[in-house]
Amino acid sequence: MSRGRTQEAVFRVLMLLSLAVVTVSLVGIVAVVLVKGAPALSVEMLTRTPTAGYYMGGGGGILNAIVGSLLLAVSATVLAFFFSIAVATYLQPEFSSSRPANAVRTVLDLLWGIPSIVYGVICFVIMAFVGIGTSLLAGIAALTLLEIPIMTRVMDESMSTVIPELKVSAHVLGSNPAETAVNVVWKQAGPGILSAVLLAFGRGIGDAASILFTAGFTDFIPRSLLDSAAALPTMIFFLSTSPMPEVRGRAYAAAFVLLVLVLVVSVVSRLLTKRLSRYVVK
Amino acid sequence: MNPQIITRDLNVWIGKHHILKDVNVSAPRRKITVIMGPSGCGKTTLLKCFNRLIDLTESVKISGKVIVDGEDIFTPGVDVIAIRKKMGLLSQKPYPLPMSIYNNVAYGLRIHGTRDRSTLDDKVKHYLEAVGLWEEVNHRLKEPATALSIGQQQRLCLARGLAVEPEVILCDEPTSALDPVAAKKIEGLLVKLKADYTIILVTHVLRQAKKIADNVNFIYFGEIVEQGPAEGFFAHPRERLTQEYLYGDVGY
C-alpha cells in the first residue's frame, strides 16, 4: 500500500472511532437515564408539584422544577440575546478597529471559561448588597451573565465569516453600516446566530451551580420575580443525593425530562435553521 | 460637456506600497471609458477611489483630487452615502444579497426611502426589464437570488445597482467570472446603458475593450502609460509598452 493510502486508512479508522465514542456516550447516557428513570416517570410527576414527603418517596411531581427551569433559561436566553447581538455586531470591522475588538474577544473567551459557580457567588454577593434574597430574578441575572460570553462569541464568529464583498455590495448601494449589519450581515449569519442562541440556552438550562445560590430552591411554582425558583438541575441534585434508591430513580426521571426539553429545542431550531438558510449566499 | 469624473495627480499608497502614481484620467458623460492593464497594477484601486470604497481599506493614504461633477469627493465633510448612491458598481463576481430576487432589487430603493408596495413592484419590474431578466425571473421573484445562474446573478446585480438611480456605472472586470454568452449579454447591456449613464469599465480583456470602449486609459504598475479615444488608441498606439500589451508581449 502506498503512503497516501495508509494515511487515508489510518485517519478513516480514527474518525470512525471518534464517531463511535460520541455516539456510544450519547446513546449510553439516554439509555441509563431511561432505564433507571422509567419506573419513576408518570403523568403525576410532570403535572404536580412535590408534596412535603416527595424527597422521601412521597407523592407529587417536579412541575415546580420544569416550570422554574423554563422560566429561568428562556428569560435568560432572551435577555442575553439582546446584549449579545449588539456586542457581536459592534465587534465587526465596520464598527470597531481590530485591536480593541480582539481585546474584547479575549475577555469574552476568559468569561466563557469561568466556572458557573463563580457567577453564582458573584450574583449572590450583589444580591446581599442590594438586599434581595434567592429569587427567580437573581437566577435569571446569573444565567444571563453566564450565557452572554458564549452567545456573543459564537455570534461574532458567524458574523466574521460574512465575506466583505457582500457588505461592499450593500455599501455601494448607499447602505450605511447599521443598515448593512441588520439587513445583510444578520441575514447571512442567521443560522450561526441561531446556533449561538441554542448553545447558550443549552448551557443555561443545564447549569446547576449558578442557580443554586441565586434562584434557591422551592417546592412551589414562582408567582413573582422575587419568589425563589426550583430548576431541573438543582432538583436532580437533591433527588440523586437521597439514600433511597426509589428517590434516586426520580432523579433519573427528572434528568430524562431535561434531556427531552433540550432535544425539543434542538429539533425546533434545526427546522428554523433550514428556513433561515434559504437566502444565505454560499 | 464637462467630463463627469476627473482625477488630478491622484496618488494612493496602501501601507508602504505606492499603488497609483500621479494618475490623471477623465470619464466623459454617457461614454464608456475603459481602464485597461494587466492584473495587479492598480485598476481596481483606481475604481475604488471613484466611489470612496477605498475608505474601507486599512492604512491607505491618498493625495491628489477626484472630482465628480465639479466637486472634490475627498474634501472632508463630503456625503459619502450620496457619492456611492451616484455610482453603481458591478464587481468581478456577482455578490447577490442574502435575500430574494425581488428584495435584491428593492433593497436599495427601501433604504433610500421608498416604502410604497406598488411603486416598489413597478420599479423592480422596470429594472429587471432593463437588464433583460424580467422574462426569465418574473414567475419566481420570491426565490433566493443564489438560485439564479451566475450570468443571471450578474445581471441582477446590475439591476440592483440601477435601481438606486446612479449616474455612473463602475464595472470591475464584470465578465471575468462569466461564460462567453453571459459575458456578451453584459457587454451588450453596457453599450445600451451608455445612452443614460457614464460608464467606467476596468478590464484586462483586450477584445472587450476594443469592442465597446469610447476612450481608453492604459495603466501599467500604477502609472497611466497612454490614453485617448479608442479608435486611435488601438490603431496607432504611440508607446512601446502599449504596443507590447496590445500585441501580447506584456501581462496576462
Image (cartoon, coloured by chain):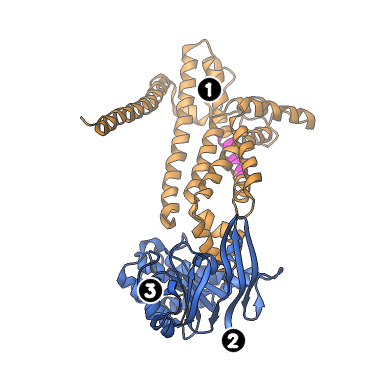
Quadrant holding the C terminus of chain A: bottom left
The answer as to whether the residues below labels 3 and 2 share one chain is yes
Look at the image and say whether residue B102 sits in the magenta stretch: no
Query: Which one is in front, A63 or B240?
Result: B240
Q: Do residues under tags 1 and 3 come within 8 Å of each other at their CB atoms?
A: no
Q: Secondary structure at mark 1?
A: helix
Is residue A8 depicted above or below B33 in this figure? above
Mark 3 falls within which chain? B
Q: Nearer the viewer, residue A2 or B216?
A: B216
Label 2 belongs to which residue?
Answer: B2
Using a 10 Å C-alpha cutoff, classify the residue at mark 1 as few (fewer than 14 neighbours), some (14 to 19) or many (20 or more).
many
Where A120 sits versus B185, above or below? above
Reading the image, the residue beneath label 1 is: A236
Mark 2: amino acid: Asn
Say which residue appears at 50% left-offset and 52% top-offset. A162
Chain in blue on the image:
B
Q: Colour of chain A?
A: orange
Q: CA distance from mark 1 to mark 2?
A: 80 Å
User: Of discs 1 and 3, which sits in the foreground?
Assistant: 3
Q: Residue sitting at 53 percent across and 69 percent down? A: B223
